Image (cartoon, rainbow, N blue to C red):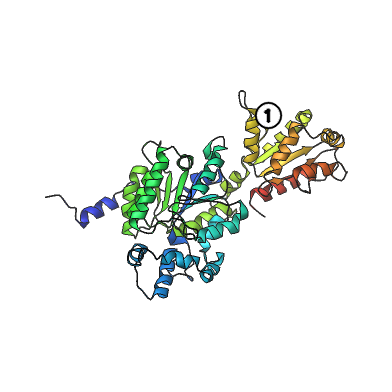
Amino acid sequence: MAFTPDEEDIDYALNNLQDLKFNMEESIGRVFNNEYILIIGSEVMLKPTVEPSGDINDYLLRHINRKLNSSYRNFDDLMRHSGTEIDPIRNLLSWDRFKRSMVVDDISEELQGLLRTKLFKVVITTTFDSYLEILMRDIWGSRLRVVNVWDTSSLSSFYDRLAEYKEVRDYYEPTLIYAFGKCEEKEGCFYARKDFEYIQTIERWLEFDKRKNLMMLFILSKRLLSLGCKFDDWYFRFFWYILRREEMKQRDGDIAIAFNRNDRSDLKLENYLKNVRAITQTELTAREFMRQMTKVLTSTDADNPYRNLVTQYRRQGKIFFSYCNKDKELAQQLFQQLRQIYPNLWFDQENIRGGDNYDTEIQYGISHAKVFIPLLTSTVAEDLKNGQTDHYYHDEWRQAANRKGELAVIPLAVEGYSMRESYHTVFEQIIGDSISGISLSEPNALGNLQKAIDKHLNGHE
């Protein structure tokens, strides 16, 4: 007869786990360095005033039960008994009146706060409704890329974009990935609702892995922070296994999950995930964790114990300094002054090493910057007056212009260049905007430059 552990055996096993605590201090730098992907589940989606549990699935099921005068307990039960020709979930989500009722204000303040930091650009959702997409579109607008694991066209477009990067881990564009499909009106749109459909979706992820799919490689290159997923469902546990398979070199703490110590299901999952070296945050609920994380990542107030780290990381590696090669000596002097404040200021003489591809490294530096500082000198003025706009530094201006809306351009003028002269309009045409700059001849010019840089690095609009 097989041995069956009793409750005391299980309790002993659960209470003697080796905890890997979430290290907030280490994680701050990783977040600012774009190392995390958020995985968002249904439980943290809505405000309690909209749905007492805050769970979008409970909310949808309650509306469906009311419309059908039924009492289905979950989606699997609903789909089993509603017939093959009827999809009450799709009917509800495509109902115009219901679609109009789905607004950002219904979404939990904790989730809104965390995503509005703009530090988690890539999000995977295990839900199939569009609430999270509504929020992310409110934050990122038309820049948001939506990827549905069951939509071949969106997947193909995403692969093509990933392929354009030097390394897939360097992709950092605003992106929402539907891990189990999205419920849409268009014909043939698939999304998982029943247990066997979750199995089908997991099989699809496994196929990606076999093909060394770029999306899988991208996810494997990141750390994962999971919030609000229902881990008592076995397919979520298997989903984790797929994302951290044995062929990947594991790192301690590459999955972070907010656990509820009072939830037996969460404790069992904690035990399960020991083999993939998850870090566990055991004292806070997912919503409490989001509130704390948002404050830690955004506040420089005295009551934030990590405020110095926040200030430090905001300043690192986010500024690209552009100059004409004839002005190299002056540029070097200014770089030395600015580097005292911004340790990882990007400067070609410091960041490009022998053997590096110059064009590739320049493109990389600009694509990862938040602030672009073109040095405007008498040399630049002469080039613009003579209509010479084919120098290398002009190409840097054009690359910066291509990131309009996400890259702040702060022109820095020295003696011999006037931003009031007609030739300056050529600069504005290339950069694609009329931008106020800073002249070094003005009093406290470097102090004003620092204020302007910090304004953009700190995320102020």
Q: Which residue is mark 1?
A: 349
**Which of 381/454 is in front?**
381
Q: Residue furthest top?
A: 354
Q: Nearer the viewer, residue 247 or 345?
A: 247
Q: Position of residue 436 (x, y in %)?
A: 79, 49
- Vertical arrangement, residue 254 with respect to residue 73, above or below: above
Q: Residue at x 36, y 38 (%)?
A: 246
Quick check: 201 above or below 367? Answer: below
Residue 419 image-quadrant placement: top right
- The image position of residue 35, as x and y in percent, is 51, 43
Report the front residue among 293 and 68: 68
* Residue 54, placed above or below residue 6: below
Q: What residue do we see at 63% from left, 40% from top?
A: 367
x 28%, y 52%: residue: 14
**Amino acid tagged 1:** Gln
Tag 1 secondary structure: helix
On the question of residue 145 being in view, the answer is yes
| Residue 55 visible in the current orientation | no
Please provide percent x and percent y for residue 374: 75, 39
